[in-house]
Image: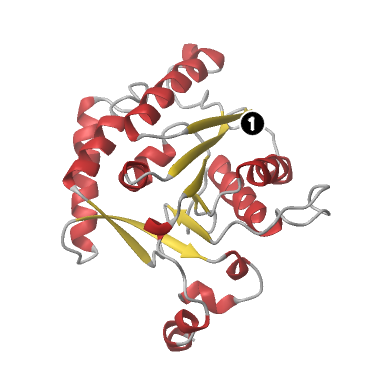
Amino acid sequence: MANFAKNLLPNFLSLPKIEEMRNVMCVQPHPDDIDLSIGGTVAKLAKQGTRITYVTVTDGGAGTLDESQIGSKLAEARKREQEKAAEVLGVSELIWLGYEDLGDYTVEEVRTKLIEIIRKSKPDMLLTVDPFMFYEVHPDHLKCGMAAAQAAFFYRLPKALPGTCDETIKLVGFFNTLKPNVFIEISEEHFHVKMQALSCHRTQFDDNTLNMLASYFLKRSFAYGIQGIVEPLKVLPPIALHVFAEFTEF
């Protein structure tokens, strides 16, 4: 199976490079998830002129150990932090779905909203968290990733949402994945911009945490056996999200 996927599938479907994408939609569970996982890639794409849209599913109001901060107070602070970080990275647009962090919402609700956005913005690539990652327990990550993947597959179908849309999405990329097949090389400049963006999220990352993260990102790149700094992704065409089990090895 692994040899079949490795040898045949790349020839069966020739995938464009991420750097060729001109309109990218990033879907995250909470403010900071994109910046943390692929902030360097976002900075790289934005600098070359790619339009980047951030869609944030929840308000981030549960991300604290301080009970007095839970809810709207923290949510508003995290929204401002994400706005500052997005400006640093060169993000074109921020869209907030506003679901409660750790709240009682469904994959289907989020999927419908994402289909509406896809039909309007017509991205050629969608990036989101990997809902298939082993040992991922956070329900916001699981629901966000699954809703985004389903939206990327169903957005043209009137059964999923009345109306139709021409095919636009060429690639779906999952970050926070254990099965990467693409490693985006980022320069030291892009890495610096990423860390600058992360430093905007002060409710989540203090200086010690930022230093630890910077070390982790560099050591992870070395562990992949790649010279320089990379951000790993699992990149697939939308067709691979249904039936074709071989793509799990691609």
Q: Residue at x 31, y 28 (%)?
A: 205
Amino acid type indicated by mark 1: Gly
Q: Nearer the viewer, residue 241 or 90?
A: 90
Badge 1: residue crowd in 10 Å (few <14, some 14–19, many ≥20): few
**In this rendering, position of residue 141 left or right of residue 119:** left
Q: Residue 107 in the image: x percent, y percent?
A: 68, 45
Q: Residue at x 37, y 38 (%)?
A: 35
Answer with the quarter of the image where residue 150 lies: bottom right
Give the colour scheme shown: secondary structure
**Relative vertical location of residue 158 with respect to residue 96 in this rendering, above or below:** below
Q: Residue 101 in the image: x percent, y percent?
A: 57, 29
Q: Residue at x 51, y 72 (%)?
A: 248
Answer with the quarter of the image where residue 238 lies: bottom right
**Relative vertical location of residue 84 with respect to residue 231 in this rendering, above or below:** above
Q: Residue 156 in the image: x percent, y percent?
A: 73, 56
Q: Residue at x 45, y 22 (%)?
A: 78
Q: Quadrant location of the C terminus?
A: bottom left
Q: Residue 40 in the image: x percent, y percent?
A: 30, 45
Q: Report the number of numbered marks.
A: 1
Q: Report the residue that reaches farthest toward the front.
A: 49
Q: Nearer the viewer, residue 58 or 11?
A: 11
Residue under pointer 1: 103
**In this rendering, position of residue 28 left or right of residue 43:** right
State the SS at label 1.
Answer: loop
